[in-house]
């Protein structure tokens, strides 16, 4: 998920659906011929699987019977929702949920704040485009590539020379080298840093465009009134770009909830770093438990929905506002 | 004076901004430098020491040079540049033992104390280097060659081939580039996945977007709502049914399977973006074309497509990079059958914990194309990201 594509409301200015002029009306069949390839592919690869996943989530381990069949007498059981009992209450999933919350809190805040800071600072210097390119560059790299880059930085050598930059710095400052990726309390944070490194460019680019779009006359008026840089930011720029910041935040939340590659490559979900998406992968492709994996996928879409709704609502408002 | 005050006032801005840029750049620089270092150095010293004297040099100068000379040749009986002699003292424990052994009844090192194990190990490293047992250049292309052919030995491909000790699956000619473990083959596989998976959705999207913006049919509103709704579905939601379906159809591990999946998944956003662009064009343009007697196919091919090239270009770049960098879909639908770059690197990470010289070279190979696209087409890239919305 290296490029945050799934960003409906930043994807483009929504257009009002206008009537087509009379002269351009074609036969009833023509439009459907144009639509057919896309509709067939989307139905097969999105609509059918989504419905099927929901169905599988109430089926058993390999989809041959209802989930109720897995219940044992005397054991706690949620009946048809037995897979959801696992997806919501099992200790491994609780760790995954907790980690995802930590991811959201730390990564989204850091990216949005750093993106805003860099966009503001870069706006005031002559080497703006160079600075922005440097911050943006990691976005072009895959999470896998970034995983290698950072695994090397976090490299830990129990004895002797540290070849990982971070531990070399720690040792040079008089500290003890830390095994960043295998220490449970530290590992998730270490992974989040990689996410921040990769996604700040996205937040910066969107925020920067919004800042450049603050009307010059308002800025001029603020200056005439004697506002200093801080006041201008706080009472002019920030309120103006607030809608953009909201979209950036919700989009980041959606992306972070679906995070998979960084964790898979760097720790494989070990050392308490599992997140929802890696748990789902492991249930399906390591434990071969389709029912549980499907239930986790359904849980994932349910937790993503509120953020999606926020983005959609803004989108619908814009559509109406035309 | 005024300019000076202005400069001082803006100094914090420059310090913070340049500081952040350095922090952002250093990880990639470290990767790049390491990928060009000899593997003997990579595990022994940090990449930031690449321009300083080799490991053990300082320790040697301090502990040994006063008798043996700075090049190790001063004592003819104990010529430290002689590989046959150093062969016996390759490791720190043999060297430490020798240093503790009296020579002609006097301590080997005279008044100097015998150094600790770490220092001796570094000196041993240095002796191996100056004696030619372990001579290696500071910078080398060998890591890239090894990564491209999928070399997994303890030395490097060129050396093994020169001494005819290569692994049984290496032919030491160009056919090694077809080795399924190699990054060369993975690069080709990545292209084979990414190119059709970029063009297919764009073509389908252009058709559908044209219909949705300039053709009349009942249910256009509904269709548009569907399009927005479909963008919500996370990838994870569709993986299980599709891999079960593919297992039945025999599409798991085939290029066709992954092309179709990427096409399906890329389409909602692609149609959405193209439709917004096409729909923003003035309707007079299309009316005029129809008045001139053009039919819908001509309007589509000769008007809509050429005009939407900028939008399609942005879209193409995004889709291409997304697929090139994707791991999850490749892992599920292609796996080891046709390893793509991301897949090969992720297996390399787990199989060779610390083969950093190979990993860094492999990672850089996978980053080459995205970086090129990024620098050459940054304008489209950023435009695709903004897609006109934030400005509106």
Image (cartoon, rainbow, N blue to C red):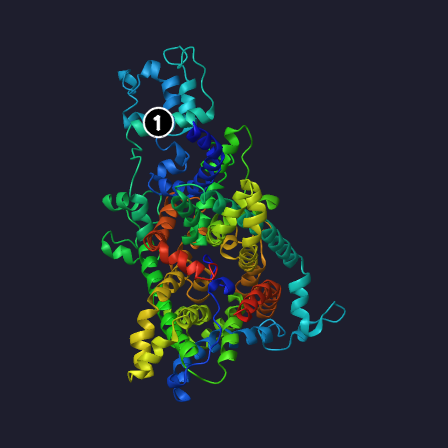
Q: Position of residue B121 (x, y in %)?
A: 42, 28
Locate residue A313 relative to residue B367 in the image: left or right: right
Q: Nearer the viewer, residue A191 or B93?
A: A191
Q: Is any part of residue A148 visible from this angle?
A: yes
- Which of the 4 quarters of the picture holds residue B316? bottom left
Q: Nearer the viewer, residue B28 or A53?
A: B28
Q: Name the residue located 53 percent from the left edge and 41 percent from the top edge.
A: A229
Furthest-right residue in view? A74
Q: Nearer the viewer, residue B51 or B228?
A: B228
Tell me the element at label 1.
loop
Locate residue A315 relative to residue A80 in the image: left or right: left
Q: Name the residue located 50 percent from the left edge and 29 percent from the top edge.
A: A172
Q: Name the residue located 25 percent from the left edge and 47 percent from the top edge.
A: B161
Density class for disc 1 (Cα within 10 Å; few <14, some 14-19, many ≥20) is few
Residue position marked by numbered label 1 in the rendering: B53
Q: Position of residue B236 (x, y in %)?
A: 53, 66
Q: Is residue A223 above or below residue B118?
A: below
Tally the marks.
1
Q: Position of residue B33 (x, y in %)?
A: 36, 40
Q: Is any part of residue A181 visible from this angle?
A: no
Q: Position of residue B244 (x, y in %)?
A: 50, 73
């Amino acid at each position: 998920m290296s490029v945050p594509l799934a960003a409906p409301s930043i994807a483009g200015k929504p257009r009002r659906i206008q009537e087509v002029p009379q002269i351009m009306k074609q036969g009833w069949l023509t439009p459907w011929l144009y639509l057919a390839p896309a509709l067939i592919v989307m139905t097969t690869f999105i609509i059918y699987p989504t419905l099927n996943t929901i169905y599988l989530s109430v089926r058993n381990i390999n989809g041959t019977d209802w989930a109720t069949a897995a219940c044992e007498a005397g054991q706690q059981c949620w009946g048809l929702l037995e897979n959801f009992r696992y997806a919501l209450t099992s200790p491994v999933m609780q760790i995954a949920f907790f980690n995802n919350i930590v991811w959201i809190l730390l990564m989204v805040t850091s990216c949005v704040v750093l993106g805003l800071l860099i966009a503001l600072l870069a706006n005031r210097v002559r080497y703006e485009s160079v600075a922005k390119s440097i911050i943006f560059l990691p976005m072009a790299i895959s999470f896998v590539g970034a995983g290698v880059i950072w695994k090397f930085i976090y490299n830990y050598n129990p004895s002797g020379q540290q070849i990982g930059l971070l531990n070399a710095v720690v040792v040079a400052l008089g500290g003890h080298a830390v095994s960043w990726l295998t220490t449970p309390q530290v590992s998730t944070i270490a992974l989040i840093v990689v996410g921040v490194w990769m996604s700040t460019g996205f937040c910066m680019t969107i925020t920067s465009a919004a800042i450049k779009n603050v009307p010059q006359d308002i800025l001029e008026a603020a200056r005439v009134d004697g506002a200093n840089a801080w006041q201008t930011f706080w009472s002019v720029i920030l309120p103006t770009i607030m809608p953009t910041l909201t979209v950036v935040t919700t989009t980041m939340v959606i992306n972070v909830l679906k995070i998979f590659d960084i964790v898979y490559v760097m720790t494989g979900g070990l050392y308490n770093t599992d997140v929802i998406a890696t748990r789902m992968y492991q249930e399906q492709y390591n434990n071969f438990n389709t029912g549980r994996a499907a239930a986790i996928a359904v849980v994932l879409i349910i937790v993503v929905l509120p953020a999606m709704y926020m983005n959609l609502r803004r989108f619908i408002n814009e559509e109406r506002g035309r | 004076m005024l300019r000076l005050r202005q400069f001082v006032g803006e100094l914090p801005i420059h310090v913070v901004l340049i500081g952040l840029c350095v922090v952002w750049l250093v990880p990639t620089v470290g990767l790049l430098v390491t990928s060009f270092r000899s593997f003997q150095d990579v595990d022994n010293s940090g990449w930031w020491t690449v321009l300083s004297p080799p490991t053990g040099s300082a320790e040697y100068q301090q502990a040994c040079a006063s008798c043996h000379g700075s090049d190790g040749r001063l004592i003819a009986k104990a010529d430290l540049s002689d590989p046959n002699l150093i062969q016996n003292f390759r490791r720190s424990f043999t060297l430490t033992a020798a240093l503790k052994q009296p020579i002609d009844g006097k301590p080997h090192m005279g008044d100097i104390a015998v150094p600790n194990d770490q220092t001796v190990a570094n000196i041993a490293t240095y002796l191996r280097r100056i004696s030619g047992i372990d001579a290696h250049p500071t910078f080398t292309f060998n890591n890239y060659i090894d990564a491209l052919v999928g070399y997994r030995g303890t030395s490097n491909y060129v050396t093994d081939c020169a001494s005819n000790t290569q692994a049984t699956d290496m032919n030491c000619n160009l056919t090694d580039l077809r080795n399924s473990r190699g990054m060369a083959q993975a690069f080709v596989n990545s292209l084979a996945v990414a190119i059709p998976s970029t063009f297919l959705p764009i073509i389908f999207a252009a058709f559908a977007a044209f219909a949705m913006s300039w053709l009349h049919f009942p249910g256009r509103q509904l269709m548009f709502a569907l399009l927005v709704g479909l963008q919500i579905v996370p990838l994870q939601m569709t993986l299980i049914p599709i891999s079960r379906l593919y297992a039945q159809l025999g599409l798991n591990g085939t290029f066709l399977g992954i092309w179709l999946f990427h096409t399906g998944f890329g389409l909602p956003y692609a149609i959405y973006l193209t439709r917004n662009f096409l729909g923003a064009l003035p309707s007079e343009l299309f009316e005029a074309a129809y008045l001139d007697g053009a039919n819908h196919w001509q309007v589509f091919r000769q008007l809509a497509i050429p005009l939407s090239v900028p939008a399609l270009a942005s879209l193409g770049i995004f889709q291409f990079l997304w697929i090139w960098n994707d791991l999850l879909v490749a892992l599920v639908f292609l796996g080891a059958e046709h390893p793509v770059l991301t897949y090969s690197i992720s297996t390399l990470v787990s199989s060779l914990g610390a083969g950093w010289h190979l990993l860094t070279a492999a990672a850089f190979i996978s980053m080459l194309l995205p970086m090129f696209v990024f620098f050459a087409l940054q304008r489209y890239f950023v435009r695709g990201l903004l897609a006109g919305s934030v400005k509106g």
